Amino acid sequence: MKLNQLADNEGARKGRMRVGRGIGSGKGKTGGRGVKGQKSRTGVAIKGFEGGQMPLYRRLPKRGFNNALRPDFVEVNIGRLQQAVDAKKLDAAKPVDGEALVAAGVIRRVRDGVRLLGKGELSAKLDLHVAGATKGAIAAVEKAGGTVTTPEPEVRKEGKRAARKKAAAEKRAAGAAAQD
């Protein structure tokens, strides 16, 4: 037998139905689209249209808010860190940060930072540098003799309205001092 003689068994692959090729084909005339009207034509999109009745997506009240600027943290449990240490993929002597976790195969990518969760048991002494951690996770790491370092939270600058009010108050104070 040669490579050019390889073939599927007879009937293993069924050919596709050719639509609109005569009434005798079984999918002729209307081509499986029913009978008449707008939906039988091509290029029609009537998603959510309910015949003039107020559609469901407009009858329901608007709820909530999706913040597009919300940070996307990668969550890692302390039990998963212990598995990586036991498998000798993670070195407990070196500081553990996002890049070390990616190199060890614990996470795929860092995204906006790593958030440590407290599920599982930890016995290795680890020096962790993460974007955030739960109270339980911090307690478990410190109980094992390790440390958790998180960056200081950024202090938000005042908004435009507050800045304008502050500038106006300073201007009034300067004007009052000049009159005295």
Image (cartoon, rainbow, N blue to C red):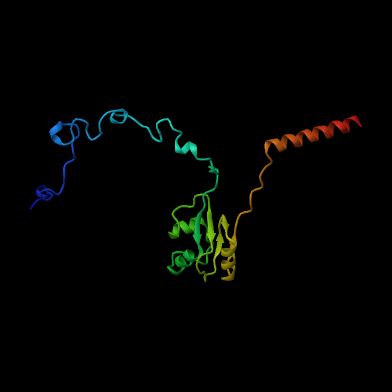
13 or 100, which is in the foreground?
A: 13
Task: From this view, report whether residue 168 is shown above or below residue 77.
Answer: above
Q: Give how far across and how far down residue 48 sits, in percent.
A: 41, 36
Give the quadrant of the C terminus.
top right
Q: Residue at x 50, y 40 (%)?
A: 60
Q: Give how far across and how far down residue 116 sits, in percent.
A: 54, 59
Q: Is residue 41 left or right of residue 164?
A: left
Q: Give how far across and how far down residue 31 sits, in percent.
A: 22, 33
Q: Is residue 165 left or right of residue 132?
A: right
Q: Residue at x 49, y 37 (%)?
A: 59
Task: From this view, report whether residue 156 is shown above or below residue 89.
Answer: above
Task: From this view, report whether residue 136 is shown above or below residue 16.
Answer: below
Badge count:
0
Q: Give how far across and how far down residue 133 sits, in percent.
A: 57, 59
Task: From this view, report whether residue 159 is shown above or below residue 36.
Answer: below
126 or 173, which is in the foreground?
A: 173
Q: Residue furthest right?
A: 180
